[in-house]
Amino acid sequence: LFNNYAILLGEKGDFKEALAMITKALSLDTNYAQAYSARAQIRFFLQDIDSACIDKTKSIDLGYLEAFNIPEIVCNGTKSIKMKYTADIFAKNKLFDQAISLYTLLIENTVDSSDYHLNRGYCYYSIKDYSKAESDYLKALKLPNPAVNLLYSNLSLLYFDQNIFEKSIELDKNIPLIVLGNYNHAN
């Protein structure tokens, strides 16, 4: 019962209360593999990656084959690797504010990366903070190894959403084409 309630709380985003409930479930049955998996997921969303990795491993050791998955390269990785992975998962799950916080920390505390600005810009765009999204996209273009096509495409969409159609069209015209191979056209 505590396990199921914790899962429901987690789905509603109440991760602190979910952690309390799942811990009660585990105090009743210390070999409850699915509960360790659920606690790994809850801890992950509370950004306690090290504890989440421990719970994931415990769940697998108890024989649960569908345990919440955190790749070993993340579990054994640096703080930056853990933060980037977490930020990416948050963005994918539309937890944009949390993702923005992590991308901001990565930008402030590690080598400035065009990917971090691109991804944070996407999160800003998703919550319709267009000025911050534009700023991040433009910054990403100035950093080494930018994803030029994606950045121009995202900027074009950003301008389109703001009814700045001339800028949007101009960017679309300037997106470099990627040649995927030779094509033979039959007449």
Image (cartoon, rainbow, N blue to C red):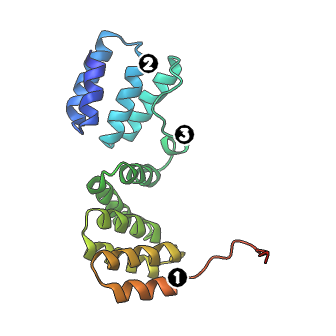
What residue would you read off at disc 3?
A: 72
Quadrant holding the N terminus? top left
Query: Compared to 180, does 62 lie above or below?
Result: above
Name which residue type carries label 1: Ile
What residue would you read off at disc 1?
A: 175
Which badge, 3 or 1, comes first in the chain's sequence? 3
Q: Is residue 70 visible?
A: yes
* Residue lying at 60% horizontally and 80% vertically, measured from the top left: 177
Q: Can residue 146 be seen in this view?
A: no
Look at the numbered disc 1 and give the secondary structure of its residue: loop
User: 10 Å neighbourhood of mark 1: few (<14), some, or many (≥20)?
Assistant: some
What residue would you read off at disc 2?
A: 33
Residues at discs 3 and 1 in contact (Cβ within 8 Å): no
User: 10 Å neighbourhood of mark 3: few (<14), some, or many (≥20)?
Assistant: few
Name which residue type carries label 2: Ala
Give percent across and percent down for residue 161.
30, 74
